[in-house]
Image (cartoon, rainbow, N blue to C red):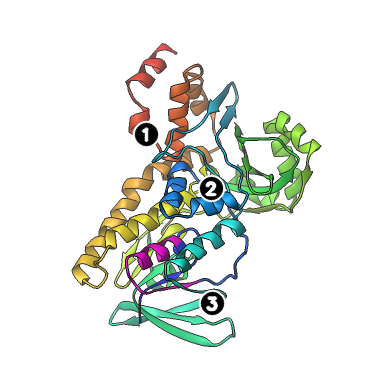
């Protein structure tokens, strides 16, 4: 019997498994894919996520994997352009946006190095219940046979379409409609930093990643998904051309190196986080539109929060229940502002935001603090301080 079985070995599951093992627990980590394997992602890790990678001893390995450092951000909307970068989080200001077939194996290897038993190509089919409590999992091995494992706690880090959430009937406690659809691909020979461009109904992002490639993403309103998906390439190119003609020229001088990837199924929710013998983590418990690229960083933070709250109390029923409740409270306390911020951006209506941001031009400290609210290095309350209010009153 294991202390913990974690389902899903990507950005939430592997760190959680690693941290549980470092606390002395016997941990099994199950992953349906076989690494390295890519997945849909905006790649970007905000400063708090980079700080956690360093804390976990994994940052040097990420740097050695050839991921380009990022230390400059620009934002451009009608009538305004801001250049700067977020303030540091725990001493880390430089960020990274690794390919997922690079990042996820690093995370899984970190778990294994901490004593986690990692099994790839294992598809979890069901949960085991006894007296209303989850007590284990049933899964298919790489050889096609069915196996079961028992555990004190089953962690569902199995994504937006979580089997664990479905099997335990975890309801959505906060929910909003889909806002955007997005398509992206990778370009070589395009000089760029971390760049964001917005106009009504469109959002374009550029992020440096591995192998000197640039990830270029275009966002469209959800209402256009059925049309965009039938002619993705012309829609993508037209979105870039009309939103940022200068970037379009750079792209035209470069070379696209992969197909277009994308989705129109970006759900927005918080789910019930835990119950007897189970807990949800990462996209399984909380998902929002990817337009603010919070997914990886939030998964890291949730893994740290869950394992810290549980500590050595896994086998004390009252202590475990209290720890899981504190973890659930953290989800809304820490991530609700990021959630609402993502939905605001995903409306693709920059007019009001651009008007406020125009007031920041010439005030570099405020520009960097604004970028810091997006990264999490600065709270929204700290951003809306007397200095900002004085600038807004003058504009």
| Foreground pick, 229 / 211 | 211
Q: Residues within 10 Å of mark 3 (few under 14, many from 20)?
A: many
Give percent across and percent down for residue 129.
Answer: 35, 81
Q: Quadrant of the C terminus?
A: top left
The image quadrant where one finds the N terminus is bottom left
| Count of numbered marks | 3
Element at badge 2? helix
Between residue 356 and residue 102, name the one nearer to us: 102
Disc 1 packing (10 Å; few <14; some 14–19; many ≥20): some
Residue 216 picture quarter = top right
Say which residue appears at 52% left-offset and 45% top-offset: 293
User: Percent x, y for residue 315?
Assistant: 24, 73
Coordinates of residue 54 in the picture (x, y in percent): 44, 49
Instruction: Determine which of the numbered discs, if any, sits on residue 303 in the image.
Output: none
Asked if the residue at tag 2 contacts the one at tag 1, i.e. Cβ–Cβ closer than 8 Å, the answer is no
- The residue that label 3 is drawn on is 122
Q: CA distance from mark 3 to mark 2?
A: 27 Å
Q: Secondary structure at mark 1?
A: helix
Considering only order in the chain, which callout, 2 or 3, is on the residue closer to the N terminus?
A: 3
Q: Position of residue 246 (x, y in %)?
A: 72, 29
Determine whether 34 is above or below 82 in the image.
below
Q: Residue at x 38, y 35 (%)?
A: 378
Q: Which tag, 1 or 3, sits closer to the chain's start?
A: 3
User: How far is disc 1 from disc 2 in space, using C-alphas?
Assistant: 20 Å
Mark 1 or mark 2: whose residue is earlier in sequence: 2
Q: Quick check: is 221 in the magenta stretch?
A: no
In the image, the segment drawn in magenta is 15-30
* Secondary structure state at the residue bearing disc 3: loop
Residue 290, which numbered label?
A: 2
Q: Find disc 1 in the rendering and name its residue.
A: 380
Furthest-top residue in view?
A: 394
User: In this view of the protein, which residue sits in the foreground, 298 or 228?
Assistant: 298
């Amino acid at each position: 019997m294991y202390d913990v079985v974690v389902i899903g070995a990507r950005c939430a599951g592997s760190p959680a498994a690693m941290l549980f093992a470092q606390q002395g627990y016997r941990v099994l980590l199950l992953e349906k894919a076989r690494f390295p394997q890519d997945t849909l992602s905006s790649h970007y890790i905000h400063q708090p996520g980079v700080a956690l990678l360093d804390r976990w001893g994994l940052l040097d390995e990420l740097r050695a994997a050839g991921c380009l450092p990022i230390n400059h951000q620009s934002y451009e909307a009608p009538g305004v352009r801001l250049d700067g970068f977020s303030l540091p989080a725990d001493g880390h200001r430089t960020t990274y946006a690794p390919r997922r077939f690079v990042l996820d194996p690093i995370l899984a290897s970190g778990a294994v190095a901490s004593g986690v038993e990692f099994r790839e190509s294992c598809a979890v089919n069901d949960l085991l219940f006894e007296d209303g409590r989850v007590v284990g999992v049933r899964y298919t091995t790489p050889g096609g046979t069915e196996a079961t494992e028992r555990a004190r706690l089953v962690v569902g880090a199995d994504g937006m379409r979580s089997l664990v959430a479905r099997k335990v009937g975890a309801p959505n406690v906060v929910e909003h409609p889909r806002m955007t659809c997005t398509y992206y691909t990778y370009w070589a020979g395009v000089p760029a930093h971390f760049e964001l461009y917005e106009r009504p109904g469109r959002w374009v992002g550029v992020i440096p990643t591995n192998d000197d490639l640039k990830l270029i993403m275009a966002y469209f309103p959800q209402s256009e998904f059925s049309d965009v998906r039938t002619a993705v390439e012309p829609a993508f190119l037209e979105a870039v051309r009309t939103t940022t003609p200068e970037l379009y020229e750079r792209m035209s001088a470069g070379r696209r190196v992969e197909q277009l990837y994308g989705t129109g199924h970006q759900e927005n929710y918080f789910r019930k986080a835990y119950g007897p013998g189970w807990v949800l983590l990462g996209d399984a418990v909380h998902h929002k539109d990817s337009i603010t690229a919070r997914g990886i960083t939030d998964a890291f933070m949730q893994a740290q929060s869950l394992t810290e709250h549980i500590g050595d109390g896994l086998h004390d029923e009252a202590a475990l229940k209290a720890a899981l409740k504190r973890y659930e409270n953290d989800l809304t306390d820490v991530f609700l502002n990021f959630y609402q911020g993502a939905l605001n951006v995903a409306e693709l209506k920059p007019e009001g935001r651009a008007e406020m941001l125009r007031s920041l031009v010439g005030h570099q400290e405020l520009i960097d603090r604004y970028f810091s609210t997006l990264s999490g290095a600065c709270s929204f309350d700290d951003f809306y301080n007397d200095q900002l209010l004085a600038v807004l009153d003058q504009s």
